[in-house]
Amino acid sequence: MDEAQQSELFELADLILAVSRLIHASKQDASAGESWTPLESAVMRFIDRNPGTSASAAAESTQLISSNFSRAVRGLEKKGLVRREVDAHDARRVRLYPTERAQENLNWLKDVWSRLLDGIVTDPEEIQTMTSNLRRIETELVARTRRGGLNAGAREAPAHPGTATRPGSGAVPGPA
């Protein structure tokens, strides 16, 4: 990849991150006191789209370590957004389902986020193209993660500036 493409891809990622933060903040501003962490939002999104999922499948798909995933599910349960059911075929497994309150929340988010973006992008074809492109980016990033990390299939990522390497030991924190 040349420097121009690298700059353009960086700008794309930076803008996606900035827009995501603004959208997340709008949810908090409109929620009348109830808040959700980004981790809870990621878990709830997966459960909404995959009702009856197993906890392990949801944790894997959201790329959360089990302790963070469990904390997010407990928080969502306390908020009345997720319910657990023992699997009818295997009592050792738990299935996760969105509650009626979660559906009400999803409808509320649809209203809040639609109003937030209303008038910014108005052409239906442009909205469809942007959605399709973002969905493709998400799908490919998830696929790369499943193949062994986000850098799987990509060129080797450079070391972070605050990381030095020692021969044979991998990266270690320290001055570069």
Image (spheres, rainbow, N blue to C red):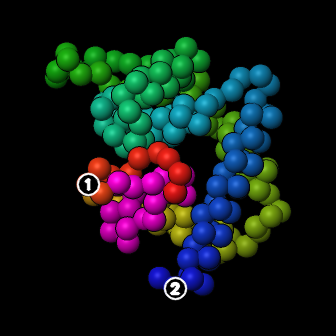
Q: Residues within 10 Å of mark 2 (few under 14, many from 20)?
A: few
Question: Helix, strand or loop at disc 2?
Answer: loop
Give residue 153's mark: none
**Left or right: 71 as drawn, with respect to 129:** left
Q: Residue at x 48, y 35 (%)?
A: 43
Front one among 42 and 160:
160
The residue sitting at the right extreme is 119
Q: Residue at x 37, y 67 (%)?
A: 156
**Which span is picked out in magenta?**
148-166
Which quadrant holds residue 107?
top right
Can residue 95 be seen here? The reply is: yes
**Most common secondary structure along the magenta stretch:** loop
**Left or right: 79 as drawn, with respect to 141:** right
Tag count: 2
Say which residue label 2 marks: 2
Q: Residue at x 73, y 73 (%)?
A: 123
Which of disc 2 and disc 1 is earlier in sequence?
2
Say which residue label 1 marks: 168
User: Does the magenta-highlighted stretch encompass residue 171?
Assistant: no
Q: Residues within 10 Å of mark 1 (few under 14, many from 20)?
A: few
| Residue 77 x %, y % | 50, 17
The amino acid pointed to by label 2 is Asp
